Amino acid sequence: MISTQIVRTGLFLTVLVTLLVLTVRYDGYYSDPAGLFCWYAVCWLLFAAAVWSLRRVSARHTAAVVLLGGITVAATGLTAAPRTSTDMFRYAWDGRVQAAGISPYDHAPRDAALVPLRDGWLFPSGTACTGPDTTRVPGPGGQVRCTRINRPGVPTIYPPVAEGYFLLVHSVSPDGSRHKPLQVGGALLSVGTTVALLLVLRRRGDVRWTAYWAWCPAVPVEAVNNAHVDVLGALLAVVALGVVVRHRGLGGALLGAAVATKLLPVVVVPGALSGLRRARDAAAVLVPAALVTALVYLPYALVSRGSVLGYLGGYAAEEGYEDTSSAKNRFALLRLVLPDDWALPVLAVILVSVVGWVVWRGDPGRPWSGALLVTGTVFLLLTPGYSWYALLLVALVALDGRWEWLTVAMAGAAKYVLAPAFDDGYAVGTTAYAIAAGAVLTGWAVRHSAPGRSREQAARHGDVHESGADRPTEPTRPNG
């Protein structure tokens, strides 16, 4: 017999799924960003209500409810073409270029050498070139054409594991399938991440936390509809952190694969080193990670004439990570209280301190706790403007249970979607991240102000005690 709690949770999920479909299909990113963000906000509220309702679902039904809900939520991202990002078009192009035996690091999409690979989908002409998400490129014989690929004048930025994924999707895609195979790939990876979280949390957490990922509105929007490859990096990071507890070498190798997917998962590495104070223990994780990263880069380095880093350096400069004077509102929270020239040095000091604390005091049985702390701190310090970066953060929240860090993901969405609706969009992003920082600090204070809580109670509420006193007296010895 279906319990009242399951029915109530199912009703919340049904409404959430309905609104997610409407949100994904609402093409308001350029024409009505404020309206689109309102749809986002309502979805996040329903997500919170559904997760809250899940608390009363019996433990034996929780995994099934979370998984079924996660599959349905992910499927909503398939109901429209990509709405708020053009990155997927670059993915499709990189897969096509590799299938033709050409390194994606050697040519920019607009290069004349690649004209034979162009088609009417990625390189339309005529009235299709009037949209705000297209860029003019020279066509053969002086023909005016455009492309849906962003930054068509520079080579790709994506690391080799991501490039291998693009090639795989291209290889199995029927002709003329356009954006759908990459979206289906994103959906499969999203559900795969849900399954990985359930497996890890069955042993070392509360499976209810999986809903923080499975039902989060960021997943169908960014991982499925926009098909961002960040979801592959998040999946590999989750599996790596689950494995490294028992098998340091294998966990390190998986971390290397995650870093070679999107580079951002490098912020998870300190978490994997939690409590490993001996150099040989840290090396057992770091050496396999470095070897895997080098090995997956090697084939591309051998066949590429140019640098396999692609546009990475140009992107870092473009986004203001190298020079605070041109950083727009990069490091926004630091720049609220510090002179611009101080932002980078202070950021470095904070990050070194947090990483040092995690490595020295972290719990080796819960490496995702340290990973979440480092990753969340990086987001608050850098205040990135692309909402899909937060997919990694959402996955770590699901592993650790500290839901207040989800407000950082919401801040990224506000900065990316809502800011263009205002004359001073930078202030919108800064305010959103400031609110998120306040929520994280409040969550920390509440968790540490309740006296006398048992370890079991703390774990149930997502608290993390990383001091040596809270570790198991006889931890399982990792292999490798």
Image (cartoon, rainbow, N blue to C red):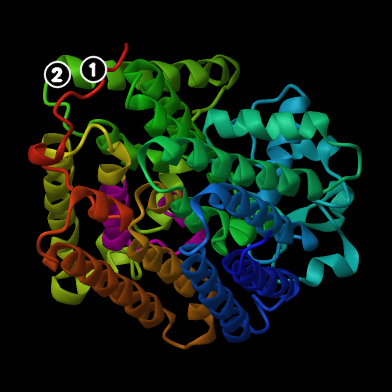
Residue at image mark 2: 279
- Give, as a three-letter code, the residue at label 2: Ala
* Residue 434 shows in this picture: yes
Residue at image mark 1: 283
* Farthest bottom residue in view: 423
Q: Quick one: 203 or 145, which is closer to the camera?
A: 203
- Give, as a three-letter code, the residue at label 1: Ala
Residue under the image location 34 percent in, 62 percent down: 405
Where disc 2 sits, the SS reads helix
Figure check: 245 above or below 398: above
Name the main secondary structure of what is drawn in magenta: helix
Range of magenta residues: 372-394
**How far, Cα to Cα, is label 2 from label 1?**
6 Å
Q: Quick one: 428 or 225, which is closer to the camera?
A: 225
Looking at the picture, how far across and down is residue 357, in whole percent? 12, 43
* Farthest top residue in view: 480
Q: Can residue 25 be found in the magenta stretch?
A: no
Question: 191 left or right of 203?
Answer: right
Q: Quadrant of the N terminus?
A: bottom right
* Residue 151 shows in this picture: no
Residue 173, image quadrant: top right
Figure check: 193 above or below 38: above
Where disc 1 sits, the SS reads helix
Looking at the picture, how far across and down is residue 302, in whole percent? 55, 14
Q: Quick one: 226 or 466, which is closer to the camera?
A: 466
Question: 341 left or right of 34?
Answer: left
Q: Are marks 2 and 1 in contact (CB under 8 Å)?
A: yes
